[in-house]
Image (spheres, rainbow, N blue to C red):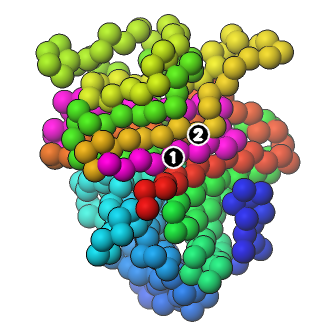
Amino acid sequence: MASLLSFSLPKPNIIKASSASPATTTLPIPEALDEKFGRKGIKFSESNNIPFVELTVRNGSSLRLRIPDAHVTSYKPKVYWKDDGLEEILYTVPAGGGDSTKAKGGIGLVINDASDKSSKGSLLSGAGWTVKDADNDSIDALQVELSCTAGTLNISYVVSLYPLSIATAVIVKNNGRKDVTLTSAILSHLNFKKRGRTAINGLKGCSYCSHPPLSSPFELLSPSEAMKSESSGWFGSENEKKPGVWTTQDVPITILKNKLSRVYAAPPSERLKAIYNTPPSKYETLDQDRELFFRVIRMGFEDIYLSSPGSLSEKYGKEYFICTGPASMMVPLVVKPGENWRGAQVIEHDNL
């Protein structure tokens, strides 16, 4: 089975199936995908002509992945011993528009062009992901690999499910003759029962500044919405510093009832030094109402992004959410010709 930590990937096997109508977009057919890549615990399906894959391990934990845009729209880990003990931890809402299968929130891969100030768009828009491979180890470890091409870049995205964790890993290879400059993140929208009982732990002593998120098709709050101040009151905004002003987190646990948008990172000026402090490789989200916590592990990425919507969450429903994940946004990535860049996120728990 492909190893997430070493990022060694299985040999590619790409399958595409043509529709009977020449005017219809070419999409993988679930039956063909099941025949080629189906394994115990890995099931391909279709909704409104859009292919999905569902992974389910032995203890009942599952995820759902929308194939054309590599969007994880559901992750239900087993967190309680009672009954089935499953809880949905991703926050997703319908995206609206003509495609009823699209959603916002969930777990989304972001890769944006950062070659100059005028080019900040997503390199993945319309890229068209295809299934490259799938593998399993009994039904306690399942993995699906997607791939796409964006200009001179070949991109592989590996989504893995285990009894107590979900992992998403990306490999970007530059097949061109020039350097490619990117910003990237794997952003997870996590749901919480109550606004005042939502917290993050493990970032004490880390440098941070107010900063907008990377623009993404999966975003619940746009960069401008994320940075807009919230009126004062009982749930008013904390006294966030202005963008570009760095400070140090001085408390072990931060309650996320107020609106904020931060990047935890080594300030760019500090990175010019021979030795500097970097953000921790892992931190925890705390749902104090449901008594659940999840550990977020960062690999390959330099920064950590974190935002909470404050009162803006009310326009989506009664439950609360945050957006967080590993990112490389303060100092863009440079991928040289013929080279690879790799990054990953793991969300794991010990709630059982």
Expressed as whole percent of the image width and height from the top left, the position of residue 112 reads: 56, 38
- Cα–Cα span, label 1 and label 2: 7 Å
Give the residue at x 32% y 62%.
87
> In which quadrant of the rendered image does the N terminus lie?
bottom right
Q: Left or right: where does residue 281 sit relative to residue 12?
A: left
Task: Report whether 2 appears left or right of 339.
Answer: left
- On screen, residue 177 versus residue 83, left or right, reads right
Q: Which residues are magenta?
A: 291-316
Binning the other alpha carbons within 10 Å of mark 2 as few (below 14), some (14 to 19) or many (20 upward) gives: some
Q: Is residue 332 visible?
A: yes
Residue 266, given in percent of the width and then of the height, sits at 64, 20
Q: Which residue is mark 1?
A: 295
> Can the viewer see residue 129 in this picture?
no
- Asked if disc 1 and disc 2 are in contact, CB closer than 8 Å, the reply is yes
Q: Amino acid at mark 2?
A: Lys
| Marks 1 and 2, the one that precedes in the sequence | 2
Which of the numbered marks, if any, corresponds to residue 282? 2
Given the image, on which type of amino acid does mark 1 rest?
Answer: Arg
Vertical order, 162 against 179 (above or below): below
For the point 67% across and 25% down, the residue is 278
